Image (spheres, rainbow, N blue to C red):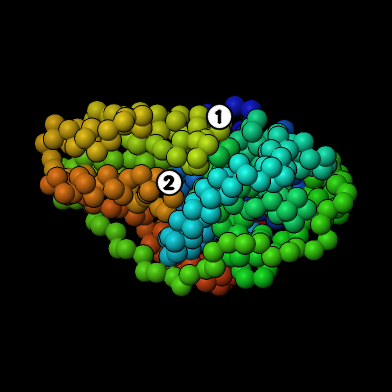
Amino acid sequence: MRMSTGNINSTRETALKMLNYFVPNMGEVYASQRNIDFGRVGRTNVSCLSPFLRHRLISEREVAAAALEAYGFEASHKYLQELCWRTYFKGWLEHRPGVWTAYCAERDQLFASLESDTETKEAYERAIAGKTGIDGFDTWASELIETGYLHNHARMSFASIWMFTLKLPWQLGAEFLLRHLMDGDPASNTLSWRWIGGLHTEGKTYLASHKAIEVCSNGRFSPDNLATQADPVGGAANPEPEDISPADGVPSGRFALLLTEDDLSPETMLGKEADIAAIAGVSSAELRSPHGAGEKASAFTSQAMTDALSRASKVYCVDTVDFSETASLTDDIHEWAQSLDTDQIAIPWVPVGWSRDRMIPVLADLENRGLTISYLRRPWDDIFWPHTTAGYFKLRKKLPRLFDEAGLEGVEGRV
């Protein structure tokens, strides 16, 4: 089952089918072809699971287990390394939440300044409309809006051209992708743009070239007149890492479960015997940016939440409610909790980003009203995140040991 970048069912069932379809390509096919973008209908060389992983309709552990079982570590290590970039970026931003806050402030200031900067505004509008005249870039801009997806190498080239050829602020480009990507993620998107611009790893940039784009687009694009040097971009410097707050245990006794768009397969986190009184969901896709969310991104998140609540209702035999569109979130959740035979609410960990920005004040208010809030975290994150304070390659060296700690040790796969 290959993902169609036109319409996609954002359900856990779809994710599992796509994983099963891609397993045969997790070894040599992925290692040798992962950087080639064959276009919208030819993506059998990559899994296209990122939108499902971003919302945890399927977990990193499940995907890693499938690769290890099929091939073992050595034969699937390229796929596993790419999978763990997502975990690395999530953990890195958890240690440095101020980077997200700074990005949002810089983004908003730049949008405000466009009203008086006609030249930059016109260049920005041409870029997001795919009217720059740059081969490849314009196609990617349209493909992003129409499908909600771009191949990873296309994203890299797009960001490099945006910054170094068009000389547009990276924060506005990051917002454009974040607004439209079905897998739009505060950590992966923001930090990837910072990495390409030389902020994540100070001074290390990625400069797109005619040859690289031609090769990685399988000859579809051959852009001319690209920048030949990567001038420094502006943005907040990396702060020192902070400690990540400890998670709580699953409440003893009966509790209500509150889901956000960041983790939508509670049965794989809590098991099927959890003593849950009722389940509510809050998705916040429209808070991705001042311009909300693109059609594909919004639809994916909405359907993913619907699927999660429907699935969880059947697993736990409880009622569910979706508070995503409510105008009085704190009051509605409090009233809902009071109607249940419990004063305990558990919520899967909400990572740095717009969901946390929305939910933390709400949860603090609920605690002030007498409810007990338990913040749950998956073992995968507890195992990996302590190793995400520095560069990715330090984490990469530890992957076999960390997979062991995650309970994936000793998997004998075929080569």
The secondary structure type at the circle numbered 1 is helix
Whole-percent x, y for residue 46 in the image: 66, 45
Please, is residue 94 above or below residue 109 in the view? below
Q: Quadrant of the C terminus?
A: bottom right
Mark 1 or mark 2: which comes first in sequence? 1
> Residue under circle 2?
354
| Relative image position of residue 268 (x, y in whole percent) | 37, 45
Amino acid type at image mark 2: Trp
Question: In whole angstroms, how far apart are the C-alphas of marks 1 and 2?
Answer: 18 Å
**Pointers 1 and 2 in contact (CB under 8 A)?**
no
Question: 43 and 360: which one is in front?
Answer: 360
Q: Secondary structure at mark 2?
A: helix
Query: What amino acid does circle 1 point to?
Result: Glu
To which residue does mark 1 refer? 295
**Quarter of the view holding residue 318:** top left
Please name the residue shown 45% across and 56% down the image. Answer: 101
Q: Residues within 10 Å of mark 2 (few under 14, many from 20)?
A: many
